[in-house]
Amino acid sequence: MAESNAIPVQDENNCPIKVDHDRKRRQFEVRLNGSHERAVLLYDYIGKKTIDLQHTEVPDAYRGRGIAKLMAKAALDFVVEEDLRAHLTCWYLQKYIKENPLPDYMERIQQRAPTDFQLR
């Protein structure tokens, strides 16, 4: 079931932007202008209590309005609320966590172990 969290940022119609969490589809989304267009943040479980925040996408016409930031916050708040661990595959989430190094977020971020390449 999708959850809605009204966040106090407004779209061009002066309506609050809502980030919906669709647990079944494993994504956070913002519907744009009441149309079929949407911004999404995709994740997947890579363990029982670990998720990989994989990809954030905002259509070009809506970039620069803070939509990705709202979805990143919603996703990391979900990680905290559900007591999960998170990998940050998405470059935007990596940037967001550097700009918002909150202790609740930082203690749940798992760094990937460096890959050892062997030349044979």
Image: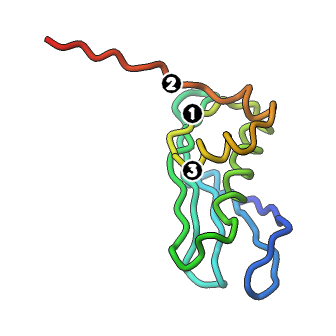
Label 1 close to label 2 by CB (< 8 Å): yes
User: Disc 3 marks which residue?
Assistant: 92
Question: Of marks 1 and 2, which one's residue comes earlier in the chain?
Answer: 1
Q: What quarter of the picture does the C terminus occupy?
A: top left
Label 2 close to label 3 by CB (< 8 Å): no
Look at label 2 and name its amino acid: Arg
Which residue is rendered at x = 28% and y = 17% of the image? 117
Q: Secondary structure at mark 3?
A: helix
User: Disc 1 marks which residue?
Assistant: 87
User: Disc 2 marks which residue?
Assistant: 112
- Nearer mark to the viewer, of 2 and 3: 3
Q: How was the colour assigned to the protein in this rendering?
A: rainbow
Tell me how far mark 1 sits from mark 2, CA to CA. Answer: 7 Å
Which residue is rendered at x = 59% and y = 42% of the image? 94
Task: Identify the image quadrant of residue 32.
Answer: bottom right
Question: Of marks 1 and 3, which one's residue comes earlier in the chain?
Answer: 1
Look at label 3 and name its amino acid: Tyr
Task: Identify the image quadrant of residue 71.
Answer: bottom right
Tell me how far mark 1 sits from mark 3, CA to CA. Answer: 12 Å
Which class describes the residues within 10 Å of circle 2: few (<14), some (14-19), or many (20+)?
A: few
Q: Position of residue 100 (x, y in %)?
A: 75, 43
Q: Secondary structure at mark 2?
A: loop
Q: Position of residue 111 (x, y in %)?
A: 56, 25
Question: Of marks 2 and 3, which one's residue comes earlier in the chain?
Answer: 3
